[in-house]
Amino acid sequence: MAAVRNPILLPMTSTPPEASAAPMSQAATGLALIVLAALLFAAMNALTRYVTAEVHPFVIAFWRNALGILVFLPLILRQGRRAFRTDHFGAHVGRSAINLLSMVIFMYALSVETLARVTTLNFTAPLFITIAAAIFLGERFRIRRILALVVGFAGVVIVLRPGMIPLNIGGVLSIVSAATWALTVVMIKRAARTETGTSITLYATVLMTPMSLLVALPWWQWLTPEQFGIALAMAFLGTVGQWITAHGIRIADASLVMTGDFTKLIWVSIIGWVALGELPDRWDAIGGVVIIASVLYIARREQVVARQRAVQRRSEGGTS
């Protein structure tokens, strides 16, 4: 497979033909999907923060995946084996393993750190995606991108304030989760060239269930009816959110994906305040603004570079 561009900061080359016929409609749909997914994930994360005060996050991760299969049960019953048809089963397994690693680390971080801070630090994922693109996809670092990365990670320092406040393991794990999620997004973007958003999410849910059971067994405990209801709600929100994200990434361009996902910080601030009595402090807010500004700048620069290269390719094609 030929090397691809940064898979989160650039539009996909496999955008359906109808997208070019109605770009404004396609863009509006993509933005709406990403914003909706951000709301669903914010609600799921708030439930995770609440329930992990009583249940180990690894156990909750298992139930979130196992119950997520229920969302796909009608599809599985209707399509049978056809729902699992793929030529890239090994890629699904690898992507699911990385996705699970990111999930359990993220859930553990939520159990020991505030909702807003974990969310803010998790926004560093696009910065890690930029780095991963250079390492794994041959993407070149330019001076503006390097400076934007420096600014973005300066935002992390503002949030964590090492040396000024004790370094919380939750903050560190939030960053590790962002890095592993970045790898997952790269793999999703690659898979979306040949796989549907439904098959990507279906395989992730089905494969992550037995994987997460192995992780959860050492801390196993049965859930109370209330905890089970919360886990069921988390499974619904998370699975539908993943499905919406897979489809949104497929049709939305870079700037829209970034902008829509950043509304998650608004949602978690509202939900955290109303449901959990948590509000981000001023340093979280300042650091979050710095991180978001850095990511948006990188996205914008990638869009400009992609447009310039497209014009160059058309020019070269016209003179050949």
Image (spheres, rainbow, N blue to C red):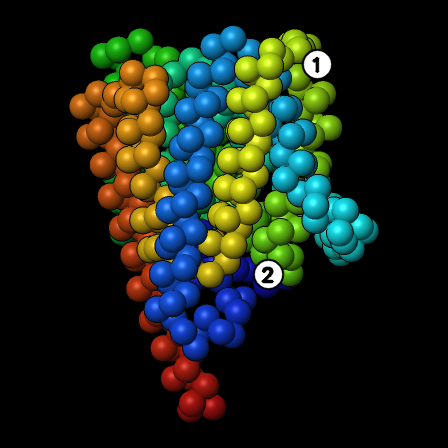
Answer left or right for 23 relative to 152.
right
Disc 2 residue type (three-letter): Arg
Q: Which of 25 and 134 is in front in this view?
A: 25
Residue under numbered circle 1: 217
Residue farthest toward the bottom in the current orientation of the protein: 319
Relative image position of residue 108 (x, y in whole percent)? 50, 18
Asked where in the image residue 45 lies, by quadrant, the reply is top left
Q: What residue is shown with label 2?
A: 193
Q: Is residue 25 left or right of residue 89?
A: left
Give percent across and percent down for residue 143: 29, 51
Q: Is residue 82 above or below residue 124?
A: below
Circle 1: residue type: Leu
Q: Which of 165 and 265 is in front in this view?
A: 265
Q: Which residue is drawn at 66% across and 51% down?
A: 199
Task: Write the residue at 62% across / 51% down.
Answer: 198
Labels 2 and 1 touching (C-beta < 8 A): no
Which residue is the extreme one toward the right? 81
Q: How crowded is mark 2: few (under 14 residues within 10 Å), some or many (20 or more)?
A: some
Instruction: Let me know if residue 313 appears in the view.
Output: yes
* Picture coordinates of residue 17, whole percent (x, y): 51, 74
How far is the residue under mark 2 from the one under mark 1? 36 Å
In the image, residue 174 above or below residue 236:
above
Seen from the viewer's position, the closer of residues 190 and 63 is: 63
Q: Is mark 1 on a helix, strand or loop?
A: helix
The mark tally for this picture is: 2
Q: Is residue 44 above or below residue 152?
A: above
Res. 85 image quadrant: bottom right
Q: In this view, does 45 lie above or below 248?
A: above
Q: Give the number of the disc on residue 121.
A: none
Kind of element beneath mark 2: loop
